[in-house]
Amino acid sequence: MALARVEKPRPDTASAAAPEFSFRRYLEDLERDSPADVIHVKQAINPSAFEATAVLQRLEECNRYPLVMFDRPLALNGKPSAFPLVSNVYATRERCARALGLRPEQAYQALGMEYARREERRIAPVVIDQSAAQVRNVVRRGEQVDLRELPIVRHHRMDGGPYVDMTPVMRDPDSGAYNIAFLRNQYKGPRKLGIHMSPRHNWQIARKYEEAGRPTPVAIVVGHHPAFYIGALNVSAFGEDDYEVVGSIAGQPLRLTPSETWGADFLVPADAEMIIEGEIAPGVREAEGPFGEFPGTYGPQRVRWVINVTAVTHRRDAMYQDIFVGHRDNWVLGAFPKEGSIFNRIKGVVPTVKAVHLPTSGVGRFHCYISIDKKVDGESKQAALIALGACDFVKHVIVVDSDVDVFREEEVLWAIATRVQADQDVDIIRNVKGATLDPSQTDDILTAKMIIDATRPVRRPFEVRIDVPRDVVARTDLEKLIGREQLARIGL
Amino acid sequence: MARIFWVVCPGCKERFYAHYEDFRHKPWKLRCPFCELEFAQEESPRIDE
């Protein structure tokens, strides 16, 4: 089985006018436009001794979620790393909105909607020469590679070691389509990583190679414009090319270049900060983990695959990007791209759907709040079933009326409190494919799903919400009545 | 989540857990996340399952 040749990408002719699609450009813009969003840690810290995540934890305990750049991290070899470490990029929806070219005030329903709109398009990538690809400013191959030069992060106390936790790219040997996914990669040696895969798209690709007795090519993208990673979280079907989806989410063709290891048979993002290339050896397994995972619990130690690293390429002054897994950085990023997809699927059947939210209280995946302008009874359950079918992460669906703001959790819980009778409005669906990392599951694959219909019934009279007359509220001038000084005292 | 079992490292005595179907009663060596010791599960002073 040979790697399929690339057909779809075209030579780079039109992208000269497009804005630079790079992580550094995003950071420059963010620091200029929203300096409160960026914190620099100028002191030396050791990321492999929890000193990076300890900073993020302290900030989290103060309910603060800035992007944090560690200017002087130590590498795994204990020496100052040449690569600044950046984390917490995705910890606010506002920064994610900026990544897609939206305004911060569009960070809620509009963000999911815009993602959904873009996800329906495809923008083919373009291919540039290796000589023009900044990610190849520095190329290290074979014995020249030493992962100990990187500021690889050890995140949580029981983690099996430092982990690279950005996105491996794999290529389906049958269709040639590329798949991008966030997967954990444990440092195991200067040219060796462990990799954990759940039975999803990259797992299917690796299984095909392994069944043919061939190594699986893999390229880990360790830093790129945030829209690259946001685009990678689409829920398109297996066989869809994620490079095309990323282009559509970013609003411009993704620039690719031949990899160092496989040349034009495996293209990698040309504007990334760093690429780690390697091959998953067929039939080889080792102990991997535990690892602090997205639910905020440790995934157990597993018997998992091994990547033999073949090359590392990077920009001359590359930055090393990391995700604070199991925290807002991970939860926000996992939420809104799915919100858009779920919204689109529901809208085809329940056209009055108003909004979809995967809140951080459900780790951006397990809880799904849907608001609809219900016209007939039963629509709420139909919408819920579509959400459950559209994304196997979603476990608990709560459907509310359109007078409830799904982005205000207190309102959703109010709707449950006042519009739900548990014996009539709660449904449990057993033995559905779930998420292997959900600690509550009693089976490796199967889970139970729950639908809470917190909408008002259509076919019988129902009490309405209390409300102060809107016209009076609208004409009430707080500054005039209370005074600027008192308003400032309460933070207004 | 699949079934897990807690194990005590025979070297540093710290506890961690592993995937039951992957490891329990199988020849794979466990690797302590705290001291990096690789050991057979029979060497563990305590296993909770």
Image: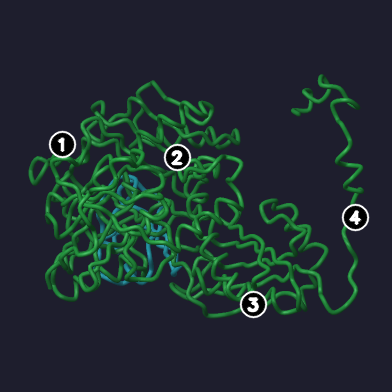
Chain colours: A green, B cyan
In the picture of the structure, the residue carrying the numbered disc 3 is A382
Mark 4–mark 2 distance (CA, rounded to whole Å): 40 Å
Q: Is residue A153 visible?
A: no
Q: Which residue is mark 2?
A: A89
What element does badge 1 sit on? strand
According to the picture, the residue beneath numbered tag 1 turns out to be A138
Q: Chain of mark 2?
A: A
Give the Cα distance between marks 1 and 4.
Answer: 64 Å
Image quadrant for the C terminus of chain A? top right
Q: Is residue A489 visible?
A: yes
Give the SS element for disc 4: loop
Tell me which numbered mark, 3 or 4, is placed earlier along the sequence: 3
Q: Quadrant of the N terminus of chain A?
A: bottom left
Dot 4 corresponds to which residue?
Answer: A466
Residue A416 image position (x, y, % from top left): 76, 63
Q: Amino acid at mark 3?
A: Gln
* Badge 3 and badge 1 both on one subunit: yes
Question: Is disc 2 placed on a helix, strand or loop?
Answer: loop
The residue under the point 53% across, 33% down is A58
* Mark 3–mark 4 distance (CA, rounded to whole Å): 28 Å
Q: Is residue A37 above or below residue A343?
A: above
> Is the same chain shared between marks 1 and 4?
yes
Q: Tell me the amino acid under the disc marked 4.
A: Ile
Foreground of the two, A441 or A326: A326
